[in-house]
Amino acid sequence: MARFFVNGEQVDFRADPDTPLLWALRDNLGLTGAKFGCGAGLCGACTVHLDGKAIRSCVTPVSTLAGKRVVTLEGIGNTSRARVAEAVHAAWVEKDVVQCGYCQPGQVMSAIALLTANAKPGDAQIDEAMNGNLCRCGTYQRIREAIHAAAAKLGKA
């Protein structure tokens, strides 16, 4: 059994300890914001926050989570990062980032982690933080613009 927290709620996960967090979230907890993309931690579609850091849930076994705190896209608005999440969401809409949308939960979670750690990232910091979040539609320029716009919104608040 692995005991950890998801979106503030304690979870007692009773299954194979090698089960990837992604499948525990989706199949056992019904939290489908994190997406399956590659299964190898390379595309970023499954990004969630683990103790405040963006991680790939498809390669994180639940056995490594004892006592840790996981936040998914569904729960980010109920955390201390809600203000950042709201700014990112507004900027995503303003900059018309989304096309197909499949990668967006991971993109958004990575952007929130970045802006929480660095309130005024430059292009190089954005590129580094978002590296590994693949977008088949190629909206990278709009994603960068949206992160800059969210940072500007947060700076004014």
Image (spheres, grey):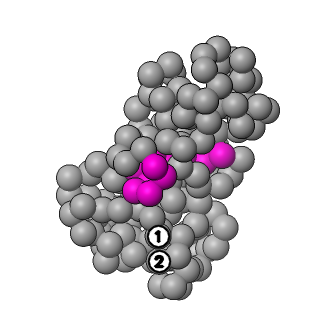
Near-viewer residue (88 or 38): 38
Rendered image quadrant of residue 33: top left
Residue type highlighted by circle 2: Asp
Q: Is residue 128 left or right of residue 67?
A: left
**Residue 43 percent across, percent down from the top left:** 40, 56
**Residue 2 percent across, percent down from the top left:** 72, 23
Asked if residue 52 can be seen in this view, the reply is yes
Residue visible at 20% across and 52% down in the picture:
100
Asked if residue 80 can be seen in this view, the reply is no
Location of mark 2 (residue)? 127
Q: Residues within 10 Å of mark 2 (few under 14, many from 20)?
A: some
**Residue 90 percent across, percent down from the top left:** 39, 59
Alpha carbon of mark 2 to alpha carbon of mark 1: how far? 6 Å
Q: Main secondary structure of the magenta part?
A: loop
Instruction: Look at the numbered discs 2 and 1 and tell me whether their residues touch, using CB distance below 8 Å.
Output: yes
Quarter of the image for the C terminus: give it: bottom right
State which region is magenta: 40-50
**Residue 76 percent across, percent down from the top left:** 55, 44
Q: Is residue 106 above or below residue 30?
A: below
Magenta residue check for 16:
no
Residue visible at 40% across and 32% down in the picture:
32
Q: Residues within 10 Å of mark 1 (few under 14, many from 20)?
A: some
Quarter of the image for the N terminus: give it: top right
Count of number-bearing discs: 2
Q: Secondary structure at mark 2?
A: helix
Residue visible at 31% across and 77% down in the picture:
141
Q: Which mark is residue 131?
A: 1
Q: Is residue 107 above or below residue 76?
A: below
